Amino acid sequence: MVLNGIDRICDFDSLFKGKKLGVITSLSGLSKDFIPSWKILAGRYTVRALFAPEHGLYGCEDAGAVWESGKKSVSGIPLYSLYRHDGQDFKPAMLTDIDALVYDIQDVGVRFYTYISTLILAMRAASAQGKDFIILDRPNPLGGIKTEGNIVKKDFESFVGMYPLCIRYGLTAAELARMVHSEEQLRCPLHIVPMEHWRRDMLFTETGRVWIPPSPNLPHFDNTLAYPGTALFEGTDVSEGRGTANPFTLIGAPYIDAEQLADTMNAAGLRGVHFLPARFTPSASKYAGVPCRGVQLFITDYHTFEPVKTGVTLLFAVKTAYPDDFRFLPPAEGNILASIDRLGGDSLLRTASSAAEVCSIFEKEAESFYRHIRPFFIYS
């Protein structure tokens, strides 16, 4: 079994002893014995505040749902939201009585999953206010061998793309922190409690750990592995399966011919995946209560499956087959960029003529990115 950072804190006692801690965590921050990391830390050290990212401390808040700080507390420890109406950063008062921030959240290894944006903002806050930063590392569920997708371009930065990373970026949280700390020349002392027994070629299913959903719409590993590609449909009028039991593996809309789309996708020569015609009625989100037709993805080989290439190919298959119906969504309220541009990190998905054009560019950027991140690897 892979031992996560929280399982190894006894070996790193000096990092925590005598410090007033603020813990950034969520439901996924559990030990191998399923004890919340904040409880373990509070039982051994002084925890003065808890900070929760998008989806909240218990991982039950919907994507984009905000909840306010204030009088909330857990076991007498103040609880602050880092996903609020007034922003996603730290207010200076939140850190007044804290010596070190401790980060322990299970990430999913995908750029637009917002926990890494919270990590980056937390490191910047620690640097600005002279606090230590401690990361209890966890596996990248998608492994550390493959990188996929493009890099966020200048003027396309957002909370779902805060740093120039690939969509599938191949780093653990601690490795990402090392890169950001170095490249931004942050002043906060950075400390890492590394994992034990994790290798870069491991997917989550090979770690010996139980999958704890890090957010409501990633209930299983298959949903998570598909997510880097099919989440791109969030920027379109096509349902990405929210409001069903199979988010990100069910894709459809009322105007799609399910059998035709499945045939098209199965003929595309994509590795590690098969498509079946699907009919579903979402209970929430897009097309709530409206019957949809489309495809369900069945991942047949976790290691050869390429989620970003698959998602891009599927997106262009729908766009090409239904030019009068398919549309990209306009910018959400308060945003300048179209949703697909925020997810995509540039305008390519909206302006390219074919999936082949996009995949060719993505492949080159991913190869370059992998070379760039190698110096920050902790694990072999």
Image (cartoon, rainbow, N blue to C red):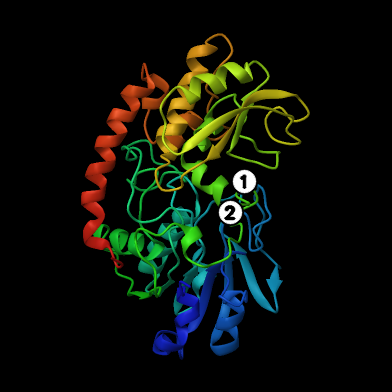
Q: Residue type at mark 2?
A: Glu
Q: Residue type at mark 1?
A: Ala
Residue at the spot of label 2 = 54
Element carrying mark 1: loop
Is residue 175 found left or right of 300 in the rendered image?
left
Residue 70 showing in the rendered view: yes
Q: Position of residue 9 (x, y in %)?
A: 46, 83
Q: Quadrant of residue 345?
A: top left
In this rendering, is residue 232 above or below 93? above
Disc 1 crowd rating (10 Å Cα; few below 14, some 14-19, many 20+) is some
In this rendering, is residue 302 above or below 341? below
Disc 2 crowd rating (10 Å Cα; few below 14, some 14-19, many 20+) is many
Residue 97 showing in the rendered view: no
Is residue 33 found left or right of 167 in the rendered image?
right
Q: Position of residue 182 (x, y in %)?
A: 25, 62
Q: Position of residue 344 (x, y in %)?
A: 41, 34
In this rendering, is residue 181 above or below 48? above
Q: Earlier in the sequence, mark 2 or mark 1?
A: 2
Element carrying mark 2: loop
Q: Quadrant of the C terminus?
A: bottom left
Residue sitting at 23 percent across and 57 percent down?
A: 374
What label sits on residue 278 in the rendered view? none
Residue sitting at 55 percent across and 52 percent down?
A: 221
Residue at the spot of label 1 = 63
Residue sitting at 43 percent across and 29 percent down?
A: 312
Q: Position of residue 223 (x, y in %)?
A: 57, 45
Residue sitting at 59 percent across and 25 percent down?
A: 238
Marks 2/1: CA distance?
A: 7 Å
Q: Are marks 2 and 1 in contact (CB under 8 Å)?
A: yes
